[in-house]
């Protein structure tokens, strides 16, 4: 008999994982669309405006799916995590309400103008709408990460007479040191997703010999942005976010690395399977001293292992956490290799003819999604067994009167519904890509695929 | 002192949700009448174009209002959302279908694709209007809160209000029907303002008929409310000035019928909005200071005095003042930008 807690956790994990597939693309594309619109406005070259219009279609599709799958997130704090909401609502309710007030209204207001207003309001207002979409979506990201960062590293709160928390310092909450690194890392990942997808669509058109002018623009823009993002993901943002973990959640950091026993000059595990029975890594591939150096910048520094911490403070699924972390880091490293190679060939003027590399770029499109999902699993599994780190355990946060039968009913409903939504999105995105960008001045291509009603 | 701060937040949250009902309410209403008021593909696209640039922003009032409730009254958010668990998750699913129907319908030109999303839009809108009406009924009737401040209600039990009611009983179903009728008329008034031709004629007729229906049903609902939850009369007895709020609603309804007959479309829509605000304001006047009325023991009710967050409310007021000013600016800007009747020929443009 599984308890309601298992279903509550699974439901939140499923719904947030699925939801975040969409905003990571829209936040990344928002920046790239702003770039294309800016070039169109500055140079007066219609090519860039038509390129932007194509991406606005995919942006709008992903945005719509992000909106409808996003509402359940706020609601579920109350429906499934009532004790947590009661305990921490005075703090995180502030950032969630601010997200609605400052970000969602901005996005929804200007999306209408971005979709329907180009002819009506002219190029400057249309560019401004693209700017506001960028600001709104990145602000939304900031406030939601502020919420998560507070759960990872609670600051700026006080305990009231009734035992619940409330906010004492507005700027303390919004400038949480954890938040700064987590935001930088997460937004870079969103740019990686957006630019990998843009590069992959460009590679697809080049390989299939369609829309050659747009293909080059997409590929060039995507590759340059993806190369920059891939590097920044590792250093400084990934490094900075990792140091926050080792500083404030040392048992989590040890679990990331599969570092069971404290030692001086600790090595970093590249590959291997954690064995929870023997507290070792099976089939290890290790770079000696590297972990000590990365954390403390001294090869001989001591890194605390899991054995330093009481078992009831260990993350509750260490192998999954270990794999999530290693998949994130491993893919991130591969991204750097692919995109630096592509950027080099672009500089040498050889990229558009390098079919082998175009194939790799095309096939790599899903992997930023996987890496980002693994990254969020790292953050969320890493925070366990806490819901609010050090203050409230996950087992103490669920709704007391929602039975396991009710929770399973809605979990199954979400699974079925999201399977349908996922298929729909893939079908519609494929449809948009197959129709391609509308060629300026003609009405044929893409005429029926405009983002309208 | 803390009591007066939390009273401000009671007013703010109530207003946010009232604006939500007025704005997204017309989206639901257009959805309810969509299948029979808009018959050709061009008419249906006209309806979707009339709400297309605004529906998402309208929905944000619910999300922002919910967020404000979450932060100002965490105990109410926790109790209410977990207590109405199934109903709320079903609302989420319906909101998804509603949003996707609007956005995806015109993506594919196929004789099966569009009718599917048309039906999904209409059914989801109707069910949402009923559920939101029933939700208000639940708030007015009260919920079986326990001493710890939690409750759980099944979707239905015996269909009678009592100490252990279900989400649906005869009273909340009545409120659900009333909600659907009011929003149907509200949506018809919106369409009358935004469209022309046959569609306009049908919208006018629907608004006229539902206007009389909502007048009759409102009387029944007010009498039923007085019967089911006598505690709501307490504020009215103590401060009879409060009768002005629902009275304003009644006047607005009369005004709506008057303007409707004269085909003054904008005035009729605004009167319909004022009617909704008056009815919700009247309910809030009766509920205050309660946010969730307990059916088992009145002492377990969650109020502005015992359910507000113990601090930080004044911090919220500062950013709320800034935020709401921006929101009003955008909202006015967007409605002004897309003001006037939907131009059918613009549907045939490249954009």
Image (cartoon, helix red, strand yellow):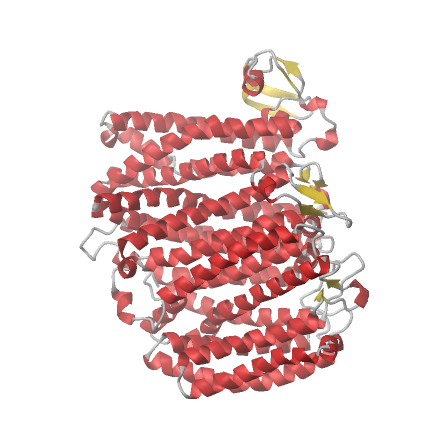
Q: Is residue A8 above or below residue A226?
A: below
Find residue A222 and report its image quarter: top left
Find residue A233 and report its image quarter: top left
Instruction: Please indicate whether residue B77 sits to the left or right of residue B199 in the image.
Output: right
Query: In front here: B289 or A18?
Result: B289
Can residue A94 be seen from the camera position used here?
yes
What residue is rendered at 60% in x and 52% in y?
B316
In this view, the residue farthest toward the front is B1
What residue is rendered at 53% in x and 67% in y?
B19
Q: Position of residue A420 (x, y in %)?
A: 47, 54
Instruction: Please indicate whether residue A294 sits to the left or right of residue A429 in the image.
Output: right
What residue is rendered at 24% in x and 52% in y?
A438
Can residue A412 be seen from the camera position used here?
no
Q: Position of residue A294 (x, y in %)?
A: 54, 19
Query: In front here: A431 or B78?
Result: B78
Q: Is residue B341 above or below residue A449?
A: below
């Amino acid at each position: 008999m599984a308890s309601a807690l298992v279903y509550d956790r699974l439901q939140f994990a499923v719904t947030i994982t699925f939801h975040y597939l969409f905003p990571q693309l829209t936040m990344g594309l928002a920046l790239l669309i702003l770039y294309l619109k800016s070039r169109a406005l500055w140079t007066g070259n219609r090519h860039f405006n038509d390129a932007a219009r194509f991406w606005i279609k995919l942006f709008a599709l992903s945005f719509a799916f992000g909106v409808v799958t996003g509402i359940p997130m706020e609601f579920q704090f109350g429906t499934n995590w009532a004790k947590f909401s009661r305990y921490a609502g005075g703090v995180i309710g502030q950032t969630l309400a601010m997200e609605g007030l400052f970000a969602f209204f901005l996005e929804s207001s200007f999306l209408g103008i971005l979709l329907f207003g180009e002819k009506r309001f002219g190029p400057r207002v249309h560019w401004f709408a693209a700017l506001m979409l960028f600001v709104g979506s990145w602000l939304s990201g900031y406030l939601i990460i502020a919420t998560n960062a507070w759960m990872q590293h609670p600051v700026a709160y006080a305990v009231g007479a009734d035992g619940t928390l409330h906010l004492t310092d507005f700027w303390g909450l919004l400038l949480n040191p954890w938040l700064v690194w987590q935001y930088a890392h997460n937004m870079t990942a969103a740019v990686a997703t957006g630019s990998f997808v843009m590069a992959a669509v460009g590679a697809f058109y080049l390989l299939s010999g369609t829309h050659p002018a747009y293909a080059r623009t997409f590929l060039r823009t995507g590759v340059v942005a993806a190369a920059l993002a891939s590097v920044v993901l590792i250093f400084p943002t990934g490094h900075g976010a990792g140091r926050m973990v080792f500083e404030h959640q040392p048992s989590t950091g040890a679990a990331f690395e599969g570092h069971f026993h404290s030692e001086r000059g600790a090595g970093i595990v590249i590959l291997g399977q954690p064995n929870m029975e023997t507290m070792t890594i099976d089939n290890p591939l290790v770079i000696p001293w590297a972990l000590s150096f990365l954390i403390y910048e001294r090869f001989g520094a001591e890194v605390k292992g899991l054995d330093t911490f009481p078992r009831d403070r260990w993350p509750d699924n260490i192998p999954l956490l270990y794999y999530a972390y290693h998949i994130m880091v491993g893919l991130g490293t591969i991204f750097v290799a692919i995109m630096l190679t592509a950027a080099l060939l672009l500089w040498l003027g050889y990229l558009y003819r390098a079919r082998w590399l175009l194939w790799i770029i095309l096939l790599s499109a899903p992997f930023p999604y996987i890496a980002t999902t693994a990254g969020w699993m790292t953050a969320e599994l890493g925070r366990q067994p806490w819901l609010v780190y050090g203050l409230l355990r996950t087992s103490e946060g669920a709704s007391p009167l929602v039975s396991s039968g009710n929770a399973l009913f809605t979990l199954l409903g979400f699974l079925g519904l999201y399977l349908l939504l996922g298929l729909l999105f893939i079908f519609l995105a494929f449809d948009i890509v197959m129709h391609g960008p509308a060629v300026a001045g003609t009405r044929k291509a893409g005429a029926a695929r405009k983002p309208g009603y | 002192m803390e009591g007066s701060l939390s009273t401000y937040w009671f007013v703010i949250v109530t207003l946010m949700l009232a604006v939500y009902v007025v704005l997204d309410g017309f989206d639901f209403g257009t959805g309810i009448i969509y299948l029979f008021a808009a018959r050709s593909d061009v008419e249906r696209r006209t309806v979707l174009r009339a709400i297309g640039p605004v529906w998402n922003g309208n929905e944000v009032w619910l999300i922002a209002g919910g967020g404000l409730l979450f932060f100002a009254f965490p105990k109410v958010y926790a109790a209410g959302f977990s207590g109405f668990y199934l109903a709320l998750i079903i609302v989420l699913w319906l909101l998804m279908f509603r949003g996707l129907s609007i956005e995806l319908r015109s993506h594919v030109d196929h004789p099966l694709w569009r009718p599917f999303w048309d039906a999904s839009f209409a059914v989801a809108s109707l069910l949402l209007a009923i559920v939101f009406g029933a939700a208000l009924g639940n708030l007015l009737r009260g919920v079986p809160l326990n001493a710890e401040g939690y409750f759980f209600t099944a979707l239905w039990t015996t269909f009678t209000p009592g100490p252990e009611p279900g989400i649906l009983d005869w009273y909340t179903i009545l409120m659900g029907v009333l909600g659907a009728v009011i929003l149907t008329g509200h949506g018809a008034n919106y369409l009358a303002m935004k469209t022309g031709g046959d569609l306009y004629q049908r919208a006018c007729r629907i608004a006229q008929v539902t206007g009389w229906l909502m007048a009759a049903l409102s009387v029944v609902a007010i009498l039923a409310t007085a019967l089911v939850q006598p505690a709501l009369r307490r504020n009215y007895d103590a401060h009879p000035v409060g009768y002005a709020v629902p009275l304003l609603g009644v006047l607005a309804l009369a005004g709506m019928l008057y303007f409707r007959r004269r085909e003054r479309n904008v005035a009729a829509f605004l009167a319909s909005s004022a009617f909704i605000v008056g009815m919700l304001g009247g309910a809030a006047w009766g509920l205050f200071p309660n946010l969730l009325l307990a059916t088992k023991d009145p002492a377990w009710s969650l109020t502005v005095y015992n359910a507000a967050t113990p601090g930080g409310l004044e911090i919220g007021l500062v950013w709320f003042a800034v935020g709401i000013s921006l929101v009003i600016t955008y909202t006015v800007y967007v409605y002004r930008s897309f003001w006037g009747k939907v131009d059918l020929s613009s549907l045939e443009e490249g954009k």
